[in-house]
Image: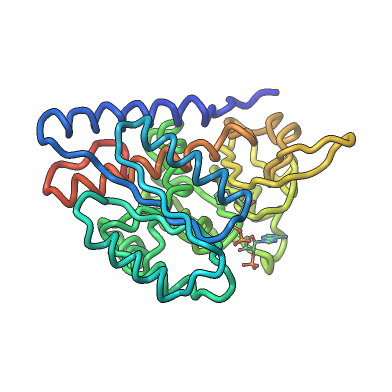
Amino acid sequence: MSATIIDGKAFAARIRGEVAAHVARLKADHGITPGLAVVLVGEDPASQVYVRSKGKQTVEAGMKSVEHKLDVDTSEEALLALVEELNADPTIHGILVQLPLPKHMNEDLVINAIDPAKDVDGFHISNVGLLGTGQKSMVPCTPLGSLMMLRDHHGSLSGLDAVVIGRSNIVGKPMAQLLLKDSCTVTIAHSRTKDLAEVVRRADIVVAAVGRPEMVPGDWIKPGATVIDVGINRIERDGKPKLVGDVDFASAAEVAGAITPVPGGVGPMTIACLLANTLTACCRANGLPEPEGLTA
Ligand code: NDP
């Protein structure tokens, strides 16, 4: 193996430490405690684990954490009323409605009901527009974490060829916008892309956000390229459950200059960036300087 392994676990711990230090200063100097409200509708097991983890890390960073767990058959109207309540609560600076929502709810309607200044997931249409036009916005957590790792590894990304595989609203598209903002030459690939292997071979930076286990083999990777593997896929190997990314780690690590592992790469950065976004939202709401290095 020749690639440097980008340790997302250690990086995320560093980000959480920076957030906690900033929160302590906010409390001491201004008497302000950032607050994050997470809303979970239904009992999806993966969402429950994720929400528990968010709450725990929010408290560890010294922030206020509020969890609202609603029954799966809660009406859309009741959820919208809760969002309105949280929008108006001055002790809450970040609101996250855990997706997916039950089928009887309109996700776009609910997300766009969140005050954009408190939209720490960065999914509100206003934040999407602000990011797309290069203005100050709330940035989706997974792409933000991926960008932080790339900046940390490369310093400047200016002029690098980047390929993002995947064009979802939560990962692929915002990732491409962020790379463009940092002056990469960006290609977005998707399921209809012709000769994906050739497209990926041109890239100095590859971000894989597809959801297909180990679909990117090492011989698609340009020697020395940086590979950010966003994919989280649960498979069975040798009769045991295993978590793998969208990149075939073993063969890609032979060729790449740097690579994120799965697990322990992008995954831990997502919650760390949620905390960073909550802190940023709190600073903005109070007219205070934003924490350096924790936003895009
Ligand atoms: P989506 O299913 O919303 O999007 C997948 C994208 O991959 C689509 O744009 C699709 O193209 C594209 N795609 C599918 N098949 C191919 C193919 N054969 N070749 C090229 N492109 C293809 O997924 P998400 O963006 O939500 O998530 C992607 C992965 O990232 C998943 O594994 C998910 O679990 C993981 N993830 C990880 C997070 C973390 O914290 N680390 C957070 C969020 C997601 P098309 O548009 O043409 O259909």
| Point 74% across, 32% down: residue | 250
Count of labels in the image: 0
Which quadrant, please, contains the N terminus?
Answer: top right
- Depth check, front residue: 85 or 241: 85
- Looking at the image, residue 7 sits to the left or right of residue 261; the answer is left
Residue 290: where, in percent of width, then height? 20, 42
Residue 85: where, in percent of width, then height? 28, 63
Residue 53: where, in percent of width, then height? 50, 39
- Looking at the image, residue 220 sits to the left or right of residue 122; the answer is right
Q: Image height check: is 253 above or below 278?
A: above
**Residue 252, image quadrant:** top right
| Point 54% across, 65% down: residue | 101
- Depth check, front residue: 144 or 206: 144
The quarter of the image that holds ligand 1 is bottom right
Q: Is residue 180 visible?
A: no
| Point 58% across, 25% down: residue | 4
Residue 263: where, in percent of width, then height? 63, 34
Outermost right residue: 238
**Residue 237, image quadrant:** top right
- Looking at the image, residue 10 sits to the left or right of residue 273; the answer is right
Q: Image height check: is 79 above or below 148?
A: below
- Looking at the image, residue 33 sits to the left or right of residue 164; the answer is left
Looking at the picture, the colour scheme in use is rainbow
Q: Is residue 93 visible?
A: yes
| Point 45% across, 72% down: residue | 108
